[in-house]
Amino acid sequence: MNSEKHHSPKRVYPEMPLIGVGAVVQMDNKILLIQRANEPGRGLWSIPGGLLEVGETLKEAAKREVEEETGIPVEIGELIDVVENIIMDEDGRVKFHYVLIDFRAKPLSEKTEIKPSSEVLEARWFTPEEIKNIPLTRTAKLLLKKIGIQL
């Protein structure tokens, strides 16, 4: 870890929009999802991802975040979408503002044993049918629909 990481941007009531990256990791007929441990969306299921660090490419950041959160090395593929997530508080102030850049990805090997990090409550492989029965973040729903998963 580089020492610059101590200057991480303020996530709640940020001074500027933050850039997040994520990956829809698919293997066979399953998708890798994480249960968020932090706001926004604590307790909801989403794709693995996190903030872009200075000096990283978008794909490097997406690869790093998937591996950090799930323990699964991946190859990042094409861009799926760029979405905004802006959440206001009761007083109309911007509490969260993310620009989310999401890619397709696949595991580098058949070894798909998940080792969730402390940043996530849980990480699991889901079939599209199983995904219909779990609480997803709004942005994860939009993304999964975009790649053709019926929710």
Image (cartoon, rainbow, N blue to C red):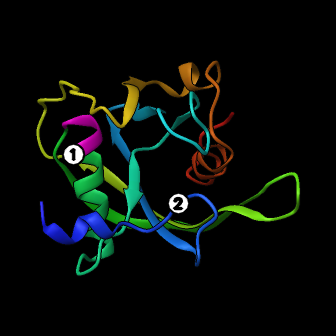
The residue at the point 55 percent across, 51 percent down is 147
Upstream in sequence: badge 1 or badge 2: 2
The spot of residue 40 in percent (x, y) is 61, 45
The residue at the point 46 percent across, 43 percent down is 47
The spot of residue 46 in percent (x, y) is 52, 39
The spot of residue 58 in percent (x, y) is 33, 73
Please report the bounds of the magenta region as a residue range: 67-71
The residue at the point 47 percent across, 33 percent down is 37
Quarter containing the C terminus: top right
Distance Cα–Cα, label 1 vs label 2: 21 Å
Kindly identify the amino acid type of the residue bearing the numbered disc 1.
Glu
Residue 110 vs residue 12, the one in the foreground: 12
Q: Is residue 70 magenta?
A: yes
Quarter containing the N terminus: bottom left
Q: Which quarter of the picture shows residue 56?
A: bottom left
Q: Is residue 97 magenta?
A: no
Instruction: Point out which mark residue 11 bears.
Output: 2
